[in-house]
Structure formats: C-alpha cells, structure tokens
C-alpha cells in the first residue's frame, strides 16, 4: 500500500467512525434520552449538603459528608438509566419526584434505595423506601458497577437493577412531579452515567 492510499484509507475509517458515533448520538437524542452527567463536571446538578463530590476519569465520586446532586429540572413521568458503583457499606440511591430541591428526603420524595446493609433488608437495595419492598433473595450492589433503571408513570413505578425487576407496583400517589437527587449517605459512591427520558 502506498502512502497516499494509506492516508486516504485512514481518513475514510476516521470518517466512518465519526459518522457511527454521531449517528449513535443522534439516535439516542432521537429516542428522547438526555445525558445529565457529561463525565467532566457537575454543571447539570445542584449540590445539596456537604458530600465531597469530585469528578475524575468520567466518574463522579463521593466518599465523605452527606448530601445529593439534585437535577435542575423537575420531572413528572420519566425513565432514568444510571450506572452506579458502591462499596458494601455504602448508603446511596436516587430520590425521585422531590417536592422541594433543597429538602431531599424520604418524606419529600420517593427513595429508590441502594443500601446493601440496611437493617430492614426488604427496604434495602432495589426497594422504594416506605413504598415498595423487595423480596428475598435480596439484591446486592456492593463492589461492582450496577445498572439501575427507574420508570415512573403516573402512580406506577418499575425498578430494575442489573436486569432483575425489583419493584413493579403503584406508589400511593404522594408525589406527582419534582426534581430528583443522586444520594451520598456513606461509604464510597460513584456514578458514571445518568440519563433521563420524559414519557
């Protein structure tokens, strides 16, 4: 292969790769998914509390303090897809449909839990605290990357953790719309992708 042919082939492959990536991004955008964590900063979030959120290598991490990264926009009916890593003692999760952005908690929101060592295991990892229990064998998230999917449509909630459906039921009608928050409550907690799609 001569030099000109090699350069032309390289440009062709680079163009094809760029087209493939842009096509994938366009398809995702066309499907209505919005990526809220860009892997570089937390500009799309409002920190609440004193958790020590840092961003490095495309991952946002907290290891001490306590608090939330709160979405800037409220949502009613939606789907969330998130990738989360926790160590075994970690207390984390995603609080959804929170009534007030600066008062995140189980009374003001629905709490989708990631908490392997919660004493009441049926409201531990994969449950919605005080709303929807999980059953044995109880899901465990510690020491691995986990894929969490949340769907909230009217009064119906579906939670799927690593392909296992943990919740599929009504939510009691307490909160119809609001912001959502990524929780840091203890241990080591990391998020590397958070997407939402209004439905």
Image: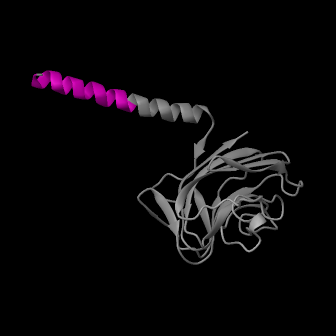
Which is nearer the eye, 29 or 91?
A: 91
Q: Is residue 8 left or right of residue 46?
A: left
Give the total of numbered labels. 0
Q: Which quadrant of the figure contains the C terminus? A: top right
Q: Which residues are magenta?
A: 2-18
Q: Is residue 5 magenta?
A: yes
What is the residue that sits farthest to the right in this orientation?
A: 172
Q: Residue 89, how many percent across, how many down?
A: 60, 73
Q: Is residue 162 magenta?
A: no
Which is nearer the eye, 159 or 74?
A: 159
Examine the residues drawn in magenta and state their main secondary structure.
Answer: helix
Q: Is residue 36 left or right of residue 116?
A: left
Q: Residue at x 43, y 34 (%)?
A: 21
Quarter holding residue 184: bottom right
Q: Residue 7, how many percent across, how many down?
A: 18, 27
Residue 43 visible to an observer of this rendering: no
What is the residue that sits farthest to the front in this orientation?
A: 137
Q: Residue at x 29, y 27 (%)?
A: 13
Residue 129 visible to an observer of this rendering: yes
In the rendered image of this protein, does residue 26 appear above or below residue 62? above
Q: Is residue 190 left or right of residue 168?
A: left
Q: Residue 107, how many percent across, how many down?
A: 82, 68
Q: Residue 55, how many percent across, how many down?
A: 46, 63
Q: Which quadrant of the figure contains the N terminus? A: top left
Which is nearer the eye, 41 or 130?
A: 130
Q: Is the image coloured rainbow, by chain, by secondary structure, or in one colour?
A: one colour
Q: Is residue 22 left or right of residue 115?
A: left
């Amino acid at each position: 292969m001569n030099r000109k042919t090699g350069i032309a082939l390289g440009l062709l492959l680079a163009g094809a790769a760029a087209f493939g990536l842009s096509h994938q991004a366009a398809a995702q955008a066309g499907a209505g998914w919005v990526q809220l964590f860009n892997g570089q900063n937390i500009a799309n979030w409002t920190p609440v509390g004193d958790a020590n959120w840092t961003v490095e290598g495309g991952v946002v991490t907290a290891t001490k303090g306590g608090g939330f990264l709160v979405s800037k926009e409220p949502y009613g009916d939606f789907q969330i897809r998130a990738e989360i890593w926790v160590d075994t003692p970690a207390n984390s999760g995603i609080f959804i449909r929170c009534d007030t952005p600066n008062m995140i908690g189980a009374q003001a929101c629905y709490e989708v839990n990631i908490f392997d060592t919660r004493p009441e295991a049926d409201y531990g990892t994969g449950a919605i605290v005080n709303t929807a229990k999980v059953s044995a064998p109880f899901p465990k998230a510690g020491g691995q990357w986990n894929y969490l999917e949340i769907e909230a449509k009217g009064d119906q909630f579906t939670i799927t953790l690593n392909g296992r459906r943990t919740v599929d039921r009504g939510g009691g009608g307490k909160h119809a719309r609001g912001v959502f928050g990524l929780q840091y409550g203890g241990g080591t907690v990391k998020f590397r992708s958070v997407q939402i799609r209004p439905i």
